[in-house]
Amino acid sequence: MPTTCSSAILRNFVSPFDATVVQLLQAAGAQVVGKSNCDEFGMGSLNTYSIYGPVVNPYQAPTSPESWAVRERRSAGGSSGGSAAAVAAGMCDIALATDTGGSIRLPASYCGVVGLKPSYGIVSRWGVVSYADSLDCVGVLARTAQDVKKAFDVLNVYDDKDPTASRPDVRRRASEAVQKSHWNAEDGLTGLRIGVPQEYFPAELLQSTLTPVRRMLENLASRGAAIIPVSLPSTRFALSAYYVISSAEASSNMARYDGIQFGSYVEPPAGTNKAKTSNVYAYTRAAGFGPEVQRRILLGTYALTADAFDNYFLQAQRVRKLVRADFNRVFSVPNVLFSTPSLPSDAGVHVLLHPSTIRTAPRLPLTANQTRCNNEDTLDAYVQDVLTVPASLAGLPAMSIPAGLGEDGWPVGVSIVGQWGCDDMVLEVGSLCA
Ligand code: GLN
């Protein structure tokens, strides 16, 4: 099957090898039945930036069959909308996807399925096309947390072909830290401390999606979990920092698509001075990259210029550090990557719980042939990620699970976020919430 990243520039590209994650699943007996649509190179939140057109959300309200006939075309979310839609429509049992700033959790939430972004470095990225290397994670979507776990258990192995993979000794230290966490899934929710971060209920969050979240918290409390309000004050800067860092890394990663190393070559018009190499690249890249990818390349290249570096890129890295420190302050389990101290059992929380997204799936205004959005739509798409990017900046495991339906009858997701390396804990809590 071709590896196109939904981009014209890779329209005819067939990879000569399989990614480690694909090899692992096949070796465990899985059958690959297809590849799924996504936003071009993973850049987007609504899966509308794709040469294949937008992904339509297949969710069907179980209670009102008469409304199916007039069903609205809503977004499946992005960037991994195809993976979420394929799972939601029952076309496959599990789907792989990447999550750089929310691309698994957002579509999972909009489509009413489960989506796990593992801890950064836990699942191999060898053979995966890079978007922003310091953030990219491969994860799993499925209809139940149990199915996600089944796939995650196969993928949760060290791969020496991935230079960013966490080494076995770090994995061992993380699982030792979890064992000392004073919570055991066999005891159900008793003893589990769940933090609810107050900053995850921003002004943009639609109140009509809050009822299922509240109901889930009440249910968890009635079954023995302690619900603890916490504060992660740097959250409000996370979205801006994410878009600076991810675009900067993307601009560097996209450099390889020049029509010579990678990408379909587009011949410059007759008379172009081909001795100037930038002339040769320009026609290939202008024709091959869609509008959003071009926007990110410009944004990212600018953030890395000498003039802008301190104000944008360095500042964003400082914010990233603050976001990480916020999380480390609230989790009872220490962060083994930064050797933070463990908190006493009656302080700190095991996991955080918050709405996955600020709304239910947005309507799709775009027709299949129309992939351009105006500036307002672009900004609106960026804001969709406001609740998912902090865990990405901190490299933490985060899983979106269906919480019920919003007032408009469309799925609402809730995210469970754990300390680095607590992927199994996140999966266990996710199963108990369902
Ligand atoms: N929507 C975010 C972006 O466009 C996240 C995408 C992703 O996780 N791949 O960058």
Image: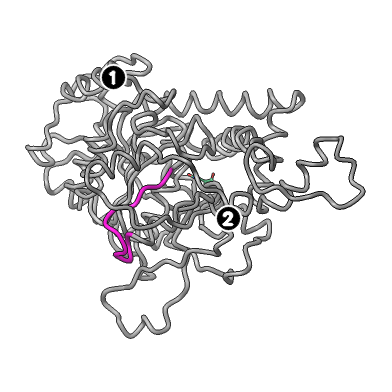
Q: Amino acid at mark 2?
A: Asp
Residue 188 in picture, x, y percent from top left: 10, 41
Mark 2 and mark 1: Cα distance apart in space:
41 Å
Is the Cβ of the residue at disc 2 closer than 8 Å to that at disc 1? no
**190 relative position to 232: left or right:** left
Magenta stretch encompasses residue 94: yes
The disc placed on residue 233 is none
Pair 2/1: label in front: 1
Viewer-closest of 198 and 122: 122
Measuring 58% from the left and 57% from the top, which residue is drawn there? Answer: 49
- Picture coordinates of residue 43, whole percent (x, y): 56, 47
Relative to residue 330, is residue 280 depicted above or below? below
Q: Is residue 270 left or right of residue 338?
A: right
| Residue plotted at (38% across, 49% down) | 356
Q: For the image shown, how many numbered marks are present on the structure? A: 2
Is residue 322 toward the left or the right of residue 432 in the image? right
Element type at mark 1: helix
Residue with the mark numbered 1:
168
Q: Secondary structure at mark 2?
A: helix
Q: In this view of the protein, which residue sits in the foreground, 19 or 85?
A: 19
Percent position of residue 294, x then y: 68, 47
Whether ligand 1 has any atom under 8 Å from the Cβ at mark 2 is answered as no
Q: In the displayed structure, would residue 423 be above or below residue 9?
A: above
Which residue is depicted at the point 55% across and 54% down?
6
- Residue 86 is left or right of residue 306, and the answer is left
- The residue closer to the viewer here, 196 or 133, is 133
Q: Which image quadrant is residue 156 in?
A: top left
Magenta segment range? 87-98
What residue is disc 2 on? 380
